[in-house]
Every structure is written in structure tokens, then in C-alpha cells.
Image (cartoon, rainbow, N blue to C red):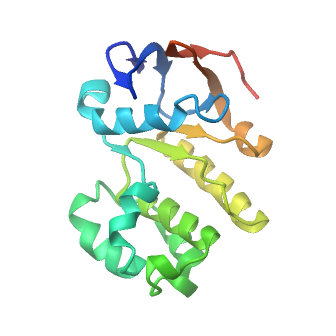
Amino acid sequence: MLIELENFTINNIDVSGSLLLESGEMTLLEGENGVGKTSIFHELNLNHKKYFKGRVVRIVDQMRLSPLNEISFRELILQMNEYRYEELDCFSDCMERIEKFQDTPINQLSGGQNQMVKIALNIYLSGDIFLFDEPLQFLDKENKIFFRSLVAKLLGSNKSICLVEHNDDSVKKLASKSYQVTLGDFIQVRSSNGVY
């Protein structure tokens, strides 16, 4: 599915370019910090009906979790149940990972635990397209390995994944293609022909 990124602005900066997201493939957005990769994710999520024409898009980030900081993951999924798209087999793998802290209020979790909650909530809600913004941040080695296996399972279930990640070449190796995001007078998204 080709997504044209031509008719919107982020922080008064025009965006130009296109992304090709395909089922069963992971696409990587690359670029320096501050060029707008996360802002592109938020635009795609906010206007998903325009860009994705009926496909369900999922992104769980700190902005989405912050109003829910006082409750635990167990309470969170009870509240979010009506937004669940489908049950994925790999959600039980996520629950095993967070079992020890699923009843702890989110605002009392460590950075790595909080990141695992965001990943697990994304998988719980499910969708056709998953947007992950630096999902390996704060994760220890064991949970990074777990995340890579989770991505492989999602791709095996014919899901599309678009990911921003700076520091882990092993997750980049799962990408079918990559796009370079640059900032000047406008944000440009162009194919970097990067297949890792």
C-alpha cells in the first residue's frame, strides 16, 4: 500500500514524500533526531482513515499512556477491551513477559517495564498496521530479543510494521525497506534503498 505524504504540515513544516507499507513486511524510518519521524507516526495515526482506507492502525506511546498512569496494565486492558481489533496468539507471550508487574500502577514501573506495557498494549489492541517508535528504548537484552521474535510473529501473521529505531542493528535486519527522513524547509521521506 503506497501512502502519499503530500498534504499535511507538522509544526508549520510541509511534508513531502511517500511510504510503501506492505503486509508481512517491516519498514524502517531513519534519520537524525528531531527531523519529524515521530510526528509522521502521529499524523498517520491521527488521520489513519485518510491514509489507510479502512485498515486498523496501532501506535501506543507515552502520550497515550500518560492519562492512565494511575492504573495497572490489567485494569488498562479491561478499559481498552472495546477497542480491541482481534486476538493475536502472541499476546499471551507478552503477558508472560509482564506477569510480575501487570498489577502495578503504570506510574510506578521502571522505564523497561513501561516500554513492555506499551508493546503489550499495542499487541493486545491489535490491528493491520503497527507503528513502533523506538520500541527497544529502555529494554534489557532479554526483552530486546523478545521484541525481535514478536516482530517476526507479527510479520508471519501478515501484519505491516513501520518502525523507528536508532540503536539496534539486529531489529533493522528484519526490515524489508527503509526510508530516510530529512528536515530542511520541509520534511522529506524518500527511499534509502536500505535492505539490511
**Position of residue 127 measured from the top left corner of the image (x, y, whole percent):** 36, 47
Quarter of the image that includes the N terminus = top left
Q: Nearer the viewer, residue 153 or 31?
A: 31
Q: Which of 51 and 92 is in front in this view?
A: 51
**Position of residue 176 measured from the top left corner of the image (x, y, whole percent):** 64, 28
Q: Can you see residue 46?
A: yes
Q: Which of 159 and 111 is in front in this view?
A: 111
Rendered position, 172 above or below 141 = above
Number of numbered tags placed on the structure image = 0
**Position of residue 88 measured from the top left corner of the image (x, y, whole percent):** 42, 59
Q: In which quarter of the image is residue 165?
A: top right
Q: In this view, does 150 lie to the left or right of 87?
A: right
Q: Is residue 43 left or right of residue 159?
A: left
Q: In this view, does 76 lie to the left or right of 2?
A: left
Q: Can you see residue 90?
A: no
Rendered position, 106 above or below 132 = below
Rendered position, 27 above or below 143 = above
Q: Quadrant of residue 133?
A: top right
- For image coordinates 40% across by 56% down, the residue present is 63
Q: In which quarter of the image is residue 56?
A: top left
Quarter of the image that includes the C terminus = top right
- For image coordinates 61% across by 75% down, the residue present is 110
**Position of residue 149 measured from the top left corner of the image (x, y, whole percent):** 66, 55
